[in-house]
Amino acid sequence: MSWFDSIIATNAKTLSKISTTLRLGAGATWPGEIALTVKPNILSSLLSGLRKGIIIVAGTNGKTTTARMIVTILEAQGLRVIHNASGANLLNGIVSALINKADWRGQVSADWGVFEVDENSLPQFIKSIKSIKSKVVLVLLNLFRDQLDRYGEVDVISEKWQKSLESLNNVKIIANADDPLIAYLASSASRPGPSFAQATAGRLEASTRFFGLDDPSQFQKKIEHATDSTFCPTCGTRLLYEGYYYSHIGIWKCIKCKTKRPPLDVSECDYPLPGLYNRYNTLAAVAASQVLDIKQETISEALAGFVPAFGRQEEFTIDGKKVKIFLSKNPTGFNQSLRTILDLGAKHLLLVLNDRIPDGRDVSWIWDVDFELLTQDEHVITVSGDRVYDLALRLKYANLNQFFVEPNLHHALKQSLDVSSKSETLYILATYSAMLDVRKLLTGRKIL
Amino acid sequence: MSTYGDRGNIICLEKRCEWRGIEARVTQVTLETPVRELKSCDLIFMGGAQDRQQKLAGDDFLHHKGPVVKAMVEQGVPALFVCAAYQFVGHYYQPYQGDKIPGAGIFDLYTVHPGDQKKRLIGNVVAELSCQLSAVSCQLKTIVGFENHGGKTYLNENPKSQIPMTKPLAKVIKGFGNNGEDGYEGAVYKNSIGSYFHGPLLPKNPHIADWLIAKALEMKYGKIIPLENLDDSLEWQAHSQML
Ligand SMILES: [Zn+2]
C-alpha cells in the first residue's frame, strides 16, 4: 500500500470513527464512498493486506447467512476474519468494512476477508481483485428475481457475471448445482472452451465444487409461482425436472442438449437452522470451508453454535412470548419463509410490506407469493407496513377474509402480541426496512 | 409469459368471476398449446417476460399465435396486454442498436428504445381514464400502477393516412406513461387494452377488470349482461393510497 493510500484510508477511518460516535450507524457506507471517490483502486490496495485470501459470497438470497456461517467456521479455526455488515454489500460497504479494521497507517491485518457482494457489484468487485495474489474462493448461491426496479433482470445479471467470471483464473468456485443458471455459469467459468454439456458430462476440474440436495422427500408437490430460469441456459429448451425443491431449484436436465445437473461434491451435513433454503446456505458454507482445508470436526462444531444474523430467524422474548423474525424480501424468499413457518406449526403471523429504496419501490411481486397456503381457520394474521393495503388486497384474493389491517406498525405489533398466548410464537415476515423497524420496536421494548 | 406479479391479473379476473357465480376456466397458453384451444378463449391476457423467455415466446407468438390473437381482437374479444406484451402487439420495436423487431401489428403503435444509457421510466404512476372506457361504472376515473420500461411507445404510426383507431387509455397525472413525452398512458383498440402498468394492473383497478369481464360476457352471449356489484372497499382503499 502506497503512502497516498494510507492517508486516504486513515482519513476515511477517522471519518468512520466520527460517524460511529455520532451514532450515524456503525455500518455506515460513506467512509468507503469517500475513499472510493478519492482513490478508485483503494479496494485492491486494502485487499492486498489479507494474508490468506478472499471469500466472496454472491447470489440473490442467502448471502448474509452463508457469509456469517463461513466467518463462524474460520473464527473457530482461530483465524482473523474481516467481513462486511449485512446489507452493506456494494463496493462502498466493502471498502468501509476494510477501513474500519485498518490500523492507523491504513493497513489491514487479517487472514481472510469474507464478503457478501451484491449481484450488480460482483463484476466490479472481481475486477478489483484480479491483481491479488492470494487465494480467491467464489461462492455462487442462486439467482432469483429480486425487485425489478433495483436490479436488472436475471438474464442480464447472469450475462454480466459470465463475462466477468471468464476473466478470473486461480479461483475456486463453490456453486449451487441445483440452480441451472448458477451451474452453467460455474461450469463455463471453470473450463472455458468446451461446452457446458461436455463439462457437466464428465468430472470437472477441481476448481469448481458443486453443492446441492439429493433428497426427493423434499420435492415440492405443487410448483410455486415465482419461477425464473426454467429454460436451458445452454440451448434455450424448456428444462425437465425430476423434482423442484423450491422456485427453479431442483434436479434438472435438458432433453435436447443433454445438459444436466452436475454431480454433487457436497450434499449433506447437519443443519443448524430450519428451512430448505438454509440447507443450501449451510451446504455452501461447508463446501467453502472444505476447500480451505478446515477439518470436518471444526466445521460441525462451529455450525452447531451458529447464531443467525439479525432479522434472519432472529428470536426475541417479549413479556414471556416468543417472537421470530423472518426477513422476506422477494417472492422466492417470502415463499421459503412461509413454507418454513408452516412446517414449524405457525399460527400467529404478522406480515409487513414496505416500499422504501432498500425494499424496492415496486410491490407487484407479492402476487407471486403463495399466500394461498394460509387458511382462515388455522392462522391469525395481521398486516402492516407502508403498503398495508396492497398486502391486505393480496390476502383477500388468496381466499382470506378475516385478518387485521393495521397501518401503524407499533399498533400492529402490539395487537399481534396481544392475541397470542405465552406458549405460542409470533412469526413476523417483513421486507428489509420493515424488518429493521420491527427490530427497533422489539429491542427498544417500546411496545409494552 | 408471466413475471412480476402478472399472476395477480389472472387471480383478479378469476376471483371477480367466481364471486359473482360466473364460471371461468384459466388456460395457460404456452409454446405447446394448440391454436384451437387459444381460439376457444373469451378473454386474453399477455404479460411481461424476461428476455430469454420473451424471445422464445416472441418467435412463436409472431408466427403462430399472433395472427390468431389479431383476428380475435378484431372480432371484439377483450384482451389485456401488459408491458412487454404491450410493446409486442404494436408494429415494431426499435432497439437502440440493430434492426427493428417486428411486432404482431394488432395495435397501431410502435416502440423505440432510446439507448442503454437513457434512464428507464420507473416509478408509481397515476393516470386518468379517457372516454373509451367511460361506460365503466365506478367511483373513480383514475388508474394506478407501477411502471418500469426502457422502451418508449408512441401511438398511431401514420396519423394522417387513416383515422386513428388505437386510442390512448389514459392521461398521465403522475409518472411517465407511454413515453414520458406526450402525457398518455396505454392504448385501447376495440375491446382490448394495452398498458405499461404493473402493480399488477387489475387488483387495484377493479373497474378495468370488470370492464374486461363485461366485454367478455357481452361477446359470448351477444347482449349486455350487467355485472353484480361487489364489495370493493379494500380495492379502492389500496387504489386511493396511491393517488
Ligand atoms: Zn439444453
Image: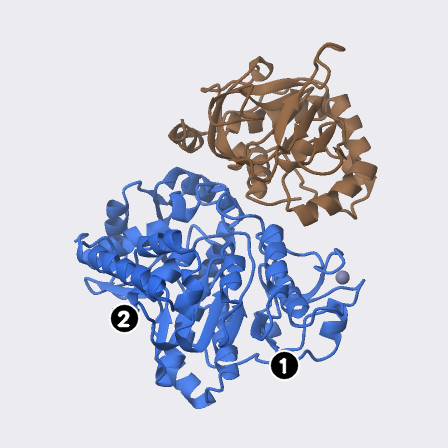
Image coordinates of residue B63 in percent, x first then y, are 83, 38
Q: Position of B101 compared to A149: left or right?
A: right
Q: Position of A327 compared to B180: left or right?
A: left
Q: What residue is disc 2 on?
A: A103
Q: CA distance from mark 1 to mark 2?
A: 37 Å
Q: Give the drawing colour for chain A.
A: blue
Residue A251 in view: no
Amino acid at pointer 2: Asp
Q: Position of A81 compared to B89: left or right?
A: left
Of the pair B237 and B93, the residue shown nearer to us = B93
Residue A35 in view: yes
Seen at 49% across and 32% down, the residue is B145
Seen at 77% across and 72% down, the residue is A198
Image coordinates of residue B222 in percent, x first then y, are 73, 19
Q: What residue is disc 1 on?
A: A206
Seen at 52% across and 74% down, the residue is A137
Amino acid at pointer 1: Ala
Of the pair B221 and A223, the residue shown nearer to us = A223
Pointers 1 and 2 in contact (C-beta within 8 Å): no
